Image (spheres, rainbow, N blue to C red):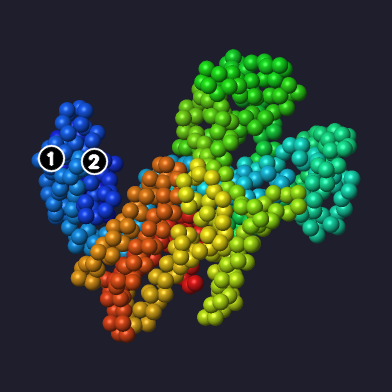
Amino acid sequence: MDIKKLIIDCFDDNAKVNFNLNKESISTPPNTNMGDYCLPCFAWVKSLKKSPQEVATILTTNFNYTKIVERTEVVGGYLNFFLNKKIVTLNILAEIIASKNNFGKSNVGENKTICLDFSSVNLAKYMHIGHLSTTVIGNCLRNIFNFLGYKTIAINYIGDYGTPFGKMITAYKLWGNEKELNEKGVDYIQDLYIKFCKEAETDETLNEQARINFAKIEKKDSEVYPLYEKFIKISKDEIQNIYKLLNISFDSWRGESYYSDKMEPVVNELNEKGLLQDSNGAKIVDLSDFNLGACLIRKSDGSSLYATRDLAACEDRFKNYKFHKSLYITDVSQKLHFAQFFKVLDLLGRDYAKNLHHIYYGRFSLPNGKIASRMGKQAILKDILNYSISKTKEIVNNNNKLTTEEKNKIATSVGVGAVVFSAIRNEKIKDVVFDLDEALDFNGETSPYIQYTVARCFSIINKVASIIKNSSYELDYNEISDESSYELIKTLNKFPDTVLLASEKFEPCLISRLLIDISKAFNKYYSNNRVFNENDVKRTRLALVEATKNVLQQGLTILGIEALEKM
């Protein structure tokens, strides 16, 4: 129920135009004693030369009361609106029940495509904790845009190119054997890579051998290239297992190697348009007029860089997908790179440059000593997920009512969900120190708390199913006329606007926070209202339980976390 729009519609046309009133003008007071919604009137003080309270009073003369708004009140520069609780409660509840799991869905993105470049792992290395935020935020944004009717293209721009592969090939040729490679996979490749890096500190010839072997990869040498392809396959298989655990998939795996021979047209165009300059033998685009320094296009030895490949990749994506927007989800340290890359495309006259967005976030790290990194390696994401699952299993093993299969399912869903939620619980730009004990707190502001609330809803619905023969609802306001019911219903009603705002701000935490608020409101509601007692079922209260379950289930799905029927 779009209450804000209904309130705006109560103003006459002159007020809407003269005061430029819209849904965004309406906000929520800090407490319900001040009204259900309010209109701050400070923005018009200067133009009208009147106090905020006088502005609010003028607006009341342009307000036409309807059944939904019972009264208004002017307090300290705010025009407060008090709603008809019965009409609001029954209409919202009926809408959510009728919508089932589609409450808040829209077609605002119809016929529009959004590309999302996220995760983008380096196949020469483990998928580590630094990949968590890009992977989780990117997947969540994809789910948000899908929910709003956009066509989304999830792109994993893998790092499958460069001298690290030359190092791995060199290490394997010097010290490796096929049997151990086949048995140990990525662990074996990484051990060889670490050994190479240590040996290269005292043997300078190793780095030269690595460069030679990488050159052979580029030329698809008959001896080296098949080994490179095998390393790629082993690495891909490893990260696919992690993506499967996270329930994430991609539409495109085109990585750096795909664009290795597709950069010349862009470089030539830069040159033809006079944008390319020499700088100590290197080729740059001077962006100093835009306070962006110099964008390096080619090194002095002629080799390409990230910017060169990103230019070619963006051209390819627009050609293939004709995207409405293209999002790049990476950490804040790459802010300058993307600002330069976008500006170069703008200077090339690409209209789509204005639709490129860098979605950046803060650091995600572990407290020292909590989860030990492997010797010589970063905190590996697979280890963190498995550790979280094992810790969850310790908790659920105490529940003797669950089967072993159910315990394993719950441990996986809750353990993985706790890690995922930690990356999207707060504003993405904030640094996060992952505390597993806090993340697994079933009574805190965590995903286990939300999942448990959903499971509680399922449990109530399933118990009632044995009492009543059909689940039709004849809504009776008298069953949910208390304040806790009203607050829950109002909180549920925020879901559509919250999803839309999350898409506009590229901010998943708006949904995370709302799901916490809904869970708190539901648990307060349930403690104050008995849904059933033996053969007596309060169907309207049951409808509110189902409405809560539907919204929380849909919200968790958007976040990339599984909603469980039993915990």
Residue type at mark 1? Thr
The image quadrant where one finds the N terminus is bottom left
Q: Is residue 356 above or below residue 533?
A: above
User: Looking at the picture, how far across and down is residue 208, in whole percent?
Assistant: 85, 33
User: Looking at the picture, how far across and down is residue 539, in whole percent?
Assistant: 28, 74
Q: Residue furthest left?
A: 61
Asked which secondary structure carries label 2, the reply is strand
Residue 262: image quadrant is: top right
Mark number, residue 40: 2
The structure residue drawn at horizontal position 82% and vertical position 54%, both measured from the top left corner, is 181
User: Looking at the picture, how far across and down is residue 61, in whole percent?
Assistant: 10, 40
Q: Residues within 10 Å of mark 1 (few under 14, many from 20)?
A: some
- Relative depth, front residue between 271 and 187: 187
The structure residue drawn at horizontal position 34% and vertical position 62%, both measured from the top left corner, is 521
- Relative depth, front residue between 101 and 378: 378
Label 1–label 2 contact, CB within 8 A: no
Q: Is residue 163 above or below residue 417?
A: above
Q: Earlier in the sequence, mark 1 or mark 2?
A: 2
Mark number, residue 57: 1
Residue type at mark 2? Pro
Q: Residues within 10 Å of mark 2 (few under 14, many from 20)?
A: many
The answer to whether 24 appears left or right of 180 in the picture is left
The structure residue drawn at horizontal position 50% and vertical position 51%, both measured from the top left corner, is 424
The answer to whether 215 appears left or right of 203 in the picture is left
- Relative depth, front residue between 316 and 537: 537
Q: Is residue 236 visible?
A: no
> In 3D space, how far apart are the residues under numbered discs 1 and 2 (Cα atoms)?
12 Å
The answer to whether 87 appears left or right of 488 in the picture is left
